[in-house]
Amino acid sequence: MSIEINNESGVQVDEESLVRLGRHVLDSLYVHPESDLSIILVDTEAMERLHIEWMDEPGPTDVLSFPMDELRPGTAARPTGSGILGDVVLCPEVAISQAEKAGHSMQEELLLLTTHGMLHLLGFDHAEPEEEKEMFGLQRQLLADFLGRDAPRETTQ
């Protein structure tokens, strides 16, 4: 499994923990071990350009996902085939402000955003209530398992 990190943000982050998390998520969802993932960290200006270009929305966002081979989760009996999962683009500057509001560290926010972005690469979405429930539940569980904690309870919005 190849997980490439490219930090263009100018913000110091624990890149190794992002790689470990990436492996954890891919292993947990039975994605072929020869699959490739790219995690790119950018500054707010670069993220805003991507956000406008791809989502037609102004301002920087926290995470964007760009799937390549449209891989989907497998099972223990039938892991997914190998391929290029795609790119997860993170903006640490946005993550810092979100982390402050949430009461945890920037690194924890980046782990959450990486998990979220990877799930999008694997075909999960949260446009509809049932999709949101499934995706966010899986996101909480994967992150809790990675951090060695119990999964937090679902909150209502």
Image (spheres, rainbow, N blue to C red):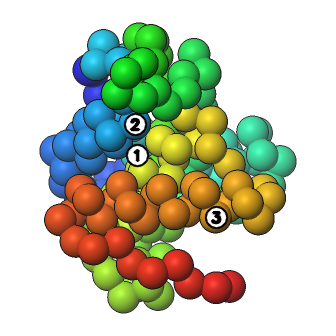
Say if 154 sits above or below 77 in the image. Answer: below
Q: Name the residue at 55% across, 27% down.
A: 72
- Nearer to us of marks 1 and 2 is 2
Give whichever of discs 3 and 2 has the lower sequence position. Answer: 2
Res 150 seen here: yes
For disc 3, the marked residue is 133
What's under tag 3, amino acid-wise?
Lys
Camera-side residue: 60 or 77? Answer: 77
Q: Is 101 left, or right, of 77 in this rendering?
A: right
Q: Position of residue 65 (x, y in %)?
A: 58, 40
Image quarter of residue 34? top left
For disc 1, the marked residue is 41
For disc 2, the marked residue is 29
Camera-side residue: 3 or 130? Answer: 130
Q: Secondary structure at mark 2?
A: loop
Q: Name the residue at 34% across, 27% down.
A: 76
Q: Name the residue at 42% across, 65% down.
A: 140
Q: Secondary structure at mark 3?
A: helix
Graded by Cα atoms within 10 Å as few (under 14), some (14 to 19) or many (20 or more), the crowding at tag 3 reads some
Give whichever of discs 1 and 3 has the lower sequence position. Answer: 1
Q: Position of residue 155 (x, y in %)?
A: 56, 84
Graded by Cα atoms within 10 Å as few (under 14), some (14 to 19) or many (20 or more), the crowding at tag 2 reads some
Image quarter of residue 127? bottom right
What's under tag 1, amino acid-wise?
Leu
Q: CA distance from mark 1 to mark 3?
A: 27 Å
What's under tag 2, amino acid-wise?
Leu
Q: Secondary structure at mark 1?
A: strand
